[in-house]
Amino acid sequence: MPNHIQTEHIDRMFPFEFYEELSEHLNAFTLLNPAFFLRKKLDATPDQRKALFDESRDNKQVIALNQNNLIQVEPFGELLTLEMCCAAQEQDVILKEPEKRGQLPISIIVAQLYDSTGAPVFASDVVDESIEQIPEVLWDDPNLFLGIVSFTEEEPRVAVIKIPEHVEKQLFESVQDEN
């Protein structure tokens, strides 16, 4: 069983335009990819930003992230890691205080796509041939879960960006059943 989804599939399913739209919906977080992190400081055309995005996706951190990009996070199950990010208030620390960067929690944008039966598509038991058939993922896909996992000293915290209605109901039903 694979412990990752190949980078070529991630790049196809989640191109620059997906992150462009995602970045418009993030308020409390900022993507660490320079095309978005430095957006306000760069005087760049969308094509130049896309080129910067593509270039930065080839760095060692992104390649390492993609080697084990399926992670288990309760109560959501397996999630696909997409891109590093940081809390918006941490941007200045990252830019101006390199000695403090290591003290910040690692935060990663994660995704899960659910099929018509409600089963997760990005999972270690899904074969490559199935992943190859997935077209570009759209921001407004009603079966798309997006979140941010922040790895703190205590335990991972998850901030939900968007969640399919059936997943939300399932999670809240299970919480209510426990009380």
Image (tube, rainbow, N blue to C red):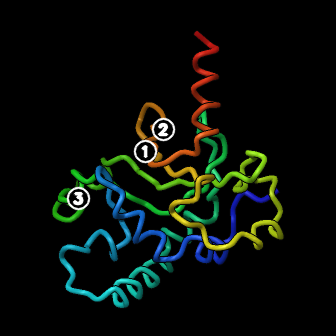
Label 2 crowd (10 A; few <14 / some 14-19 / many >=20): some
The mark nearer the N terminus, 2 or 1, is 1
For the C terminus, give its image quadrant.
top right
How dense is the environment of label 3, judged by Cα within 10 Å: few (below 14), some, or many (20 and up)? some
Instruction: Give residue 139's position: percent from left, percent from top.
Output: 51, 62
Seen in the picture, residue 109 relative to 64 is either above or below; the reply is above
**Which amino acid lies under the numbered mark 1 shown in the image of this protein?**
Ser
Q: Give me the disc on residue 150.
A: 1
Vertical arrangement, residue 45 with respect to residue 157, above or below: below
Q: Which residue is mark 3?
A: 91
Q: Nearer the viewer, residue 132 or 140?
A: 140
Q: Amino acid at mark 3?
A: Gln
Residue at 64% in and 14% down = 177
Which one is earlier in the sequence, the residue at label 1 or at label 3? 3
- Kindly state the secondary structure of the residue where label 3 is placed: helix
- Is the Cβ of the residue at disc 1 closer than 8 Å to that at disc 3? no
Mark 1 and mark 2 in contact (Cβ < 8 Å)? yes
Separation of marks 3 and 2 at Cα, in angstroms: 21 Å
Q: Amino acid at mark 2?
A: Pro
- Image quadrant holding the N terminus, namely bottom right
Residue sitting at x 58%, y 76%: 11
Q: Is residue 28 left or right of residue 148?
A: left
User: Residue 141 sits in which quadrant?
Assistant: bottom right
Write down the residue under mark 2: 156
